[in-house]
Image (cartoon, rainbow, N blue to C red):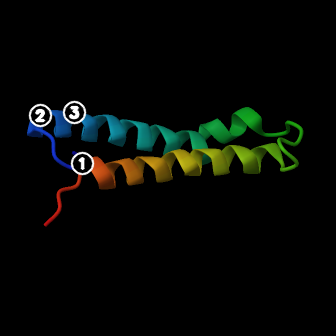
Amino acid sequence: MIGQMEPARRKRLATILIIVFFAAMLMGAGPGAFLVNGKGPILGMPAIYAWVVSWFFVQASMVVIAYFTVWKKR
């Protein structure tokens, strides 16, 4: 069931989510932005904007996953 798992598995999942979240934070606005700087448009948007927005969605999905699986209901 969603939100009910043993503590060891919950801690492991939380660690993975934290690592992915901070990697997305680094890639979105940090050095990862330099990888696409100056490229052509992606889906009609400037490449740098599309890059940052896509990493934002990765971060948002990590928060949603944590909400339903890791964070305990009080």
Q: Give the image location of residue 15, x and y in percent.
A: 27, 37
Query: Which of the two labelled residues, at mark 3 and mark 1, occupies the earlier sequence position?
Result: 3
Mark 2 neighbour density, 10 Å: few (under 14) some (14–19) many (20 or more): few
Residue plotted at (75% across, 36% down): 36
Q: Residue at x 48, y 53 (%)?
A: 60
Seen from the viewer's position, the closer of residues 69 and 34 is 69
Marks 2 and 1 in Cβ contact (< 8 Å) = no
Q: In the rendered structure, are the residues bearing label 3 and label 1 in contact, judged by CB atoms less than 8 Å apart?
A: no
Which residue is drawn at the image coordinates 31% and 52% (left, top)? 68
Label 3 is placed on what type of residue? Arg
- Horizontal and vertical percent for residue 43? 84, 44
Q: Is residue 8 above or below residue 74?
A: above
Q: Residue at x 13, y 67 (%)?
A: 74
In the image, residue 65 lies at what x, y percent?
37, 48
Question: Marks 3 and 1, how far apart in space?
Answer: 10 Å
The foreground one among 19 and 4 is 4
Disc with the residue nearer the chain's start (2 vs 1): 2
Q: Give the secondary structure at mark 3.
A: helix
Tell me the quarter of the picture where residue 12 sits: top left
The residue that label 3 is drawn on is 12
Which mark is on residue 18?
none
Q: Amino acid at mark 1?
A: Val
Horizontal and vertical percent for residue 1?
Answer: 21, 45
Identify the disc placed on residue 8: 2
Question: How crowded is the residue under tag 1: few (<14 C-alpha within 10 Å), some, or many (20+)?
Answer: many
Label 1: which residue? 70
Of residue 68 and residue 32, the one placed in the foreground of this image is 68
Assess whether mark 3 and mark 2 are in contact (beta carbons under 8 angstroms). yes
Q: Element under label 1?
A: loop
